[in-house]
Image (tube, rainbow, N blue to C red):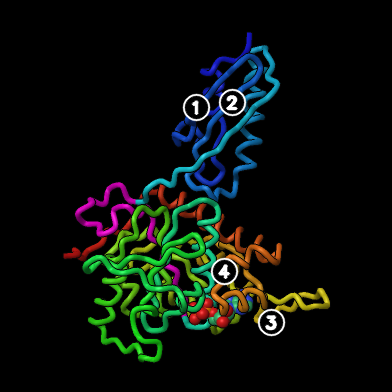
Amino acid sequence: MPLTSEQVHDALRTVKDPDLHKDLVTLQMVKDVQADGDDVSIHIELTTPACPLKDKIRDDIELAVKAKAEEVGTTVKAVNVEFSADVRKANERAKDRDNPLPDVKHVIAVGAGKGGVGKSTVAVNLAVGLAQFGAKVGLLDGDIYGPSLKTMLGLDDVPTPKPRGNILVPFEVHGIRSMTIGKLVPPDKPLIWRGPMAHGAFKQLATQTDWGELDYLIVDLPPGTGDVPLTLTQLLPLTGAVVVCTPQQVALDDATRAVRMFQQLGVEVLGIVENMSYFVGDDGKTYDIFGRGGAEMMAQQMNLPFLGAVPIHMELRVNCDAGEPLKNWRGNAALAEELDRLCKNLAAQISIATLSGKFVQPTLSVS
Ligand code: ADP
């Protein structure tokens, strides 16, 4: 007798999502099971389209279904696993009236201890990378003192969408939605904000932009530990933060402060990214210019996930300066792989944080 769908379900109870440490049935990821003679088809709904463990889950399912067949004295020929993804909302408990962006499932801050370490570069590539996996992504330039997204997204010649009343309409470029103060003020005007004005400008960009439905809203924060991260945590339910740093000791000291700041604000640190980790020369040799591995070690010592290392790549700088982030996935396979790895590791940490359900509630109401 061929396997029944119930028996396949039983088999799936033994397959764990390796990141979430629970079985697929308990996680409500099994959307459909068809057992048709010795062919079995299974539809699994993942918690992110950028799941790093798809292949492992597929292999484990096949093994579990075959083991079940053997246990009940039958055989299966083909186990077809089809994946889809539905990013789960971080904070079902946040009452919509407290949340100015109820259609955004995850707000992720990207911070750094100091400027120039590649925070905006990482934020742009996380946003564009996650979108390429099929997620709906927004990118907010929260660096109101030194907005770089106008250049990095190539917005110079893109007309600013007409606001609807006092609602800002985001730019739609490179597969993502984006908003930056860099397009709302004259380019040579110094951006001098007193504390309350910085708060107001950030609040307006974050909450008065019509983001629509998003899986992930990535927020590029100003470097350091100033007003904006505080405003962000007071305004929006954050899923967590990513801290970008370079490997040399002075940079790590600042990054440690940034991590501590998020932790003090009750924000989960989803991971550390080591940027400018090393350089591969034309001679094929690897040069550890800043001391590769420093940030990974810091992550380990602080018991934080390490999301990955991005080496110094000339293409990355050229594509950023030219406002063409998609080219990072076109020319250099190693670079594309490194960026994809970052995106997948972040997506996995977001799913893990979602399941753990610990989030700080915003304390300011938006009126
Ligand atoms: P931050 O936001 O931390 O101030 P940026 O993202 O603006 O830093 O990066 C500073 C400069 O360094 C930019 O010109 C950027 O293109 C370049 N850059 C960042 N990361 C890399 C990298 N891994 N390889 C080459 N250039 C990089």
Front residue of 98 and 316: 316
Q: Mark 2: which amino acid?
A: Ser
Q: Nearer the viewer, mark 1 or mark 3?
A: 1
Answer few, some or many: residues within 10 Å of disc 1's Cα (few below 14, many 20 plus, some between 14 and 19): few
Q: From the image, which quarter does the N terminus lie in?
A: top right
Q: How far across and how far down the image is residue 303, in percent?
A: 51, 62
Disc 4 and disc 2: Cα gap in Å?
Answer: 38 Å
Disc 4 and disc 3: Cα gap in Å?
Answer: 25 Å
Residue at the top extreme, as displayed: 1
Disc 4 and disc 1: Cα gap in Å?
Answer: 37 Å
Q: Which mark is residue 325?
A: 4
Q: Which residues are magenta?
A: 91-113
**Residue drawn at (47%, 30%), measured in percent from left and top?**
31
Is 99 magenta? The answer is: yes
**Which is more N-terminal, label 2 or label 4?**
2
Which residue is tagged 3? 289
Answer few, some or many: residues within 10 Å of disc 2's Cα (few below 14, many 20 plus, some between 14 and 19): some
**Which is more N-terminal, label 3 or label 4?**
3
Which residue is tagged 2? 41
What SS does tag 3 mark? loop
Which residue is tagged 1? 32
Q: How far across and how far down the image is residue 2, in percent?
A: 63, 12
Q: Are marks 4 and 3 in contact (CB under 8 Å)?
A: no
Is 145 magenta? The answer is: no
